[in-house]
Image (cartoon, rainbow, N blue to C red):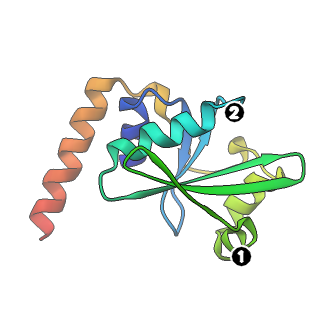
Amino acid sequence: EPLVAVCALAQVAADVVASRIGAIAVLRERAGTAPAEAAAAVSALLAGSEVVLVTRAGSQLSATRYEGGERGADIPAGLLLDSAPQDLEDLILGEKTVADLAGVADSTAMSRLGAVRALKKIAKKMRKER
């Protein structure tokens, strides 16, 4: 739910699913600079966390780190896929679609107010666990 809320606040339309390495957001808008803009917007709201943008153009994969709203270093896509969950690899390679996955949440279904409330609730829970 945190990534869904952050996407909603950043006005990034995405389908989000949990994985063993963190949440995966599949962007609805993939043309032009939209993916880079979405990664920058989401990473700007996730202080101290890293976002990895993975894109595919034909058979060419690329992976780039974003932190604090800024583009960072490129990551060898092969290394990323080597440690990625199978669902992520299947999505990237086009062997699965979001519809094939369980537990997918739509960021556009959450209002900005709902996103703020969800993030406050998560933050409160995290403070109690300390």
Tag 2 secondary structure: loop
| 27 with respect to 18 (left or right) | right
Q: Quadrant of residue 93?
A: bottom right
| 94 with respect to 24 (left or right) | right
Disc 2: which residue: 30
Return the x and y of residue 47 as percentages of the image width and height: 30, 52
Disc 1: which residue: 82
Residue found at x 61% / y 30%: 34
Mark with earlier residue (2, 1): 2
Q: Is residue 100 above or below residue 21?
A: above
- Label 2: few (<14), some (14–19) or many (≥20) C-alpha neighbours in 10 Å: few
Looking at the rendered image, the quarter that the C terminus falls into is bottom left
Q: Is residue 124 above or below residue 85?
A: above
Q: Is residue 35 visible?
A: yes
Q: What is the three-letter code of the residue carrying label 2?
A: Arg
Q: Are marks 2 and 1 in contact (CB under 8 Å)?
A: no
Return the x and y of residue 73 as percentages of the image width and height: 56, 61
Tag 1 secondary structure: helix
Q: CA distance from mark 2 to mark 1?
A: 23 Å
- Label 1: few (<14), some (14–19) or many (≥20) C-alpha neighbours in 10 Å: few
Q: Is residue 117 above or below residue 46?
A: above
Return the x and y of residue 51 as percentages of the image width and height: 48, 54
Q: Is residue 1 visible?
A: no
| 69 with respect to 100 (left or right) | left
Residue found at x 68% / y 43%: 98
Return the x and y of residue 102 as percentages of the image width and height: 61, 51
Q: Quadrant of residue 125?
A: bottom left
Residue found at x 14% / y 68%: 129
Q: What is the three-letter code of the residue carrying label 1?
A: Asp
